[in-house]
Amino acid sequence: LTTLEKRMKCGIGKCGRCNIGNLYVCRDGPVFTYAQIKKFISSEY
C-alpha cells in the first residue's frame, strides 16, 4: 500500500484537480495498492 497526495479543491472529484490518470486522489484514495499504481504507471509511459 502507498499513499498519494495532490492538491484538492472540491474533495469530491468534480473539479478534476486531484486526478492521476483515471484515479481521483480525493475520491478513490489517498491509499492505493501497488496493483493500482502499476496500472497507472504502465498506461502513462
Image (cartoon, rainbow, N blue to C red):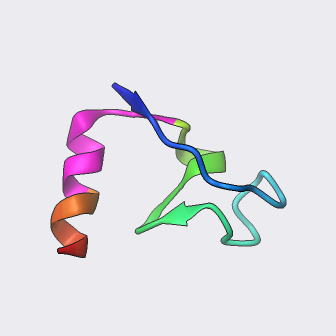
Q: Position of residue 38 (x, y in %)?
A: 19, 50
Which quadrant of the rendered structure holds the N terminus?
A: top left
Picture layout, residue 12 above or below residue 17:
above
Q: Position of residue 28 (x, y in %)?
A: 54, 45
Q: Position of residue 22 (x, y in %)?
A: 43, 67
Picture layout, residue 9 above or below residue 44:
above
- In the picture, measured across the screen, residue 34 lies left or right of residue 19, that is left
Residue at 76%, 72% in the rendered image: 15
Q: Position of residue 41 (x, y in %)?
A: 23, 60
- The segment highlighted magenta reads 31-39
Residue at 68%, 69% in the rendered image: 17
Which quadrant of the rendered structure holds the C terminus?
A: bottom left
Q: Nearer the viewer, residue 25 or 12?
A: 25
- In the picture, measured across the screen, residue 43 lies left or right of residue 7, that is left
Residue 40: which quarter of the image?
bottom left
Q: Nearer the viewer, residue 12 or 44?
A: 44
Picture layout, residue 10 above or below residue 17:
above
Residue 13: which quarter of the image?
bottom right
